[in-house]
Amino acid sequence: MRFKMRRNYEDDVALFKWKSTFLFYSFLFLILITLPLFSNSYIIYILNLIGIYTIVSLGLQILTGYTGLISLGHVAFFAIGAYSSAYLTSTLKLSFWVSLPISGMITCVIGFIVGIPALRMRGLYLAIATMAFSFIIEQIILQWEGVTNGVRGITLTRPTLGLISFRSDYVYYYLILSIALLLTMGIRNLLRSPMGRALIAIRDSEIAAQVMGIHLGRYKIIAFGMSAFYTGIAGCLFGHFMKYIGPENFTLLDSIGFIVMILIGGLGTLQGAVLGSVFVTFLPEFIRLIKDFFPSIIKEQSGIQPLVYALILIFFIIYEPHGIYGRWLKLKFYFEMFPYYKKDTFRRERKFYKSERSR
Amino acid sequence: MIIQEVLGGLTLGSIYALVALGFVLIYKTTEVINFAQGEFMTLGAFISFSLITSIKLNILLAIPITLILTFIFGILLDRLLLRKLVGEEAFALVMVTIGISIGMRSLIGMIWTYDTLSFPQIFSKNPIRMLGIITTPLQIGIIATTIAAVALLYIFFKYTRVGIAMQATAQNQLGSYLMGVNVERIFGLVWGISCMAAAIAGILLAPIIFLNHNMGFIGIKAFPAAIIGGFGSIPGAVVGGLILGVSESMAGIYLPTGFKDVFASLILLIVLMIRPGGIFGIQEKKRV
């Protein structure tokens, strides 16, 4: 077990607690920068998607992981980001560099608006309400043909910056990478600030947070807005990456996919958001890869992918509720504490009484 | 004209009511919001479809066998999967049921088919005149079956020992456990009964919208019904289902296109905004 001697306040809020962590993340950064050199056009496509989904997971992590408000309709914000950028660039002929922040802001404002009625709802009612919200947005996309072009969808173009053109996936990767890093730093800083701690306090106990003087309504709305902003930016990047968006890109299953990402990665951790989006995005490719080793009766089934997806989700909730990052922490803890590791250290507390209803 | 639309709405509404009833039963007793309720419905419809068309059973024989099979399925699901998770956070449980729903949908597709099948008609679709209204035996049959199912459930909860034990468990799990109620068995039974209610809804719905592995999406549309009713009240769920069905078919006539599909969601949002506990819901006190 390592202990940190804190000599001043800067030590307490340092971005990296240990020098080794700093080295690890710098190494990771180097790998991320050089990754396109070693990948073919297919892998770079997947990497771009991972980048976009990482931003979504980060946004959802603010809302669900840190503030404890469950959203089953996050695809609505994703769609709003994508469609507003599509409208701004194709109809209003704005530059991508203007439309990126504006579509983020539009989504953020809608997030605030959704956040206001959400204040009255608790727990799973909120989850169902956000789901209803996403159905309504889906229908608006279908019906508001003047802006969204209905079922036909909209085509978008990749941006250029001076002499650099982001038309190739290899270059677009760096755009997504830099925005994702910027937004990660944003959350990291948010979590070190009083606001981040307020959000975590709300997650752990609303009443205790209120007693400590945290304005519940304000912080919940801010969490909604920030989460929507991140998702909107990701949606904008997604639209310009796919070059075409239609209503079929934004369904309930995508919302569930976002939740699954942060759940499998690890709820309430930034590393979890990244690991989860990597895992979930690679999963279909992985299934395609291992499919050849199975007998033909399994191989030829067309619905095998959602089934594996469902089984992994259930497996994680039952056996690995802290996600991939939680397993990594446990592993680290095991070696740090060796040979004093106790299995019950990470045991979850179970409640055998009406917990949700009387909170 | 209006009366006919109301009747059509009531038909769809009674199916919503049956699905919502399943949600409420499970939520009240086990505190799980079951997103797989719609897939239970699909499962029931497909089992009875196989019994009728492949094994060539009489419909009157096939339906009870379907109900028994789905009941067993519900109990097994509880025993094998959900019992491991008793006492977990509600969010984790919801995600498990979402996993079950995705998994069941693809399993049903694998076992049966991904194509759309037409379900054998139980009630005739030929219009008849009754009391000056044009209706079909199908509509009357659906409404009558729903009334019968709800009445049976009411009698079950009111007059049988197990039913009363279920009510006790819904009120206080720990208390009823201390009073000698076998809470685990009750949980299993509740999953079985809701699965059965969903199967009835599936068998009634399949002749209207054809048999498809995706028809469980109706289950998600029944959420508003349960929420209007306050998620904890069985009569509430039935009334909520009927309100939803009628208002949806009204929205189809009087509002522009697109409203019909989201009308359920709109009602849900409005109800939750005005009364977060549902119209019939009991306002629970906060306890620290």
Image (spheres, coloured by chain):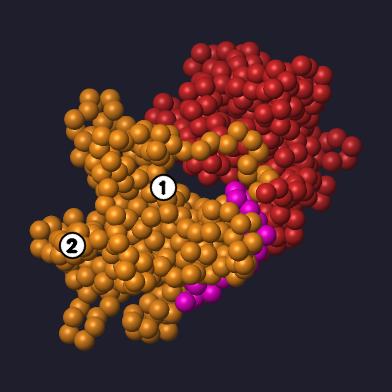
Chain colours: A orange, B red
Q: Are marks 2 and 1 on the same chain?
A: yes
**Position of residue A32 in the picture relative to residue B107 (left or right):** left
Q: Residue at 64% across / 61% down in the picture?
A: A211
**Position of residue A299 in the picture relative to residue B249 (left or right):** left
Outermost residue toward the left? A38
Compared with A173, A340 (above or below) is above
Chain containing mark 2: A
Q: Residue at 43% across / 36% down in the picture?
A: A347
Q: Residue at 51% across / 32% down in the picture?
A: B85
Compared with B78, A266 (above or below) is below
Where residue A73 sits in the image (x, y, percent)? 51, 56
The amino acid sitting under disc 1 is: Leu
Graded by Cα atoms within 10 Å as few (under 14), some (14 to 19) or many (20 or more), the crowding at tag 2 reads few
Depth check: B209 or A225 in front? A225
Instruction: Give the magenta range.
Output: A105-125
Outermost residue toward the bottom? A162
Q: Secondary structure at mark 1?
A: helix
Where residue A260 sits in the image (x, y, percent)? 41, 47
Depth check: A21 or A287 in front? A21
Would residue A81 be visible to someone looking at this image? no
Would you name the residue on which mark 2 appears?
A23
